[in-house]
């Protein structure tokens, strides 16, 4: 298969959240909003038809907690792959807010590498609903079978499957598939 478009997730793919995943399991005693916030939005995707109020509240809470808990760090190998790989169009799909995503990509010096960036603010339903991937496909005019989605979480795997797009969960898998 000849791929023309690579779509990247942001959290745990391009950048690493400040709160390690192993801590999330210890958060059972906190409210749903706090658990959503400290999971880097991934848990929001488990509510595929979340209403706009819940989605907006979760996004605001996530950003507030991120400001308190620390900076996201680059996934250096992925950032370098994005910076130095030619021959593919690239896009980003993230459930985070538009400002947060653009800020993170700019900090890594890769914001100009993407033909499209779709965030949680651009869709009516978050991952695992395929709406964001489908928006990118329509804008890019690239077919599903010419597209690969790279996301590290289970929710990303479901999103890719729901959109009928080849999905990988590691940089090594991406390189082998290309």
Image (cartoon, rainbow, N blue to C red):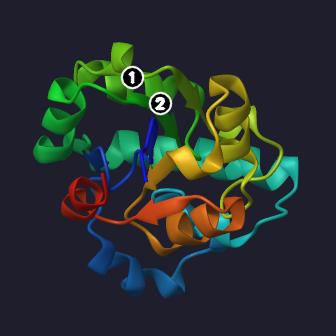
Q: Is residue 135 above or below residue 49?
A: above
- x, y (%) of residue 121? 70, 34
The image quarter containing residue 44 is bottom right
Residue positioned 53% across, 45% down in the render: 146
Question: Residue 19, relative to residue 23: is it above or below?
Answer: above
Residue 100, label in figure: 2
Give the residue at x 58% y 52%. 145
- Image quarter of the N terminus: bottom left
Q: Are marks 2 and 1 in contact (CB under 8 Å)?
A: yes
Dot 2 lies on which element? Answer: helix
Query: Residue 12: x percent and y percent?
Result: 32, 56
As measured in the structure, the alpha-carbon distance from the residue carrying label 2 to the one carrying label 1 is 5 Å
Which residue extends farthest front? 1
Toward which corner of the image does residue 35 lie, by quadrant? bottom right
Q: Going by the image, does 12 lie left or right of 114?
A: left
Using the image, determine if residue 9 lies above or below residue 83. Answer: below
Q: Residue tagged by mark 1?
A: 103
Q: Answer with left or right where residue 168 lies relative to residue 58.
A: left
Q: What element carries label 1?
A: helix
- Residue situated in front as seen by the camera: 44 or 14: 14
Quick check: can you spot residue 34?
Answer: no
Q: Where is residue 41 in the image (x, y as percent from the top left)?
A: 54, 57
Q: State the image quarter where residue 103 is shown.
A: top left
């Amino acid at each position: 298969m000849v791929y023309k478009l690579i779509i990247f997730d942001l959290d745990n793919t391009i950048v690493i959240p400040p709160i390690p995943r192993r801590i999330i399991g210890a958060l059972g005693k906190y409210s749903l909003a706090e658990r959503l916030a400290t999971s880097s939005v991934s848990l929001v995707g488990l509510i595929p038809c979340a209403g706009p109020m819940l989605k907006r509240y979760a996004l605001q809470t996530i950003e507030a907690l991120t400001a308190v808990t620390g900076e996201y760090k680059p996934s250096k190998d992925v950032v370098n792959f994005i910076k130095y790989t030619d021959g593919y169009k690239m896009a980003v799909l993230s459930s985070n807010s538009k400002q947060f995503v653009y800020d993170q990509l700019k900090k890594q010096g890769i914001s100009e590498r993407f033909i499209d960036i779709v965030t949680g603010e651009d869709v009516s339903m978050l991952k695992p609903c395929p709406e964001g991937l489908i928006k990118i496909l329509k804008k890019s005019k690239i077919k599903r079978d010419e597209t690969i989605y790279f996301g590290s979480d289970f929710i990303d795997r479901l999103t890719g499957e729901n959109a009928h797009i080849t999905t990988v969960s590691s940089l090594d898998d991406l390189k082998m598939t290309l």
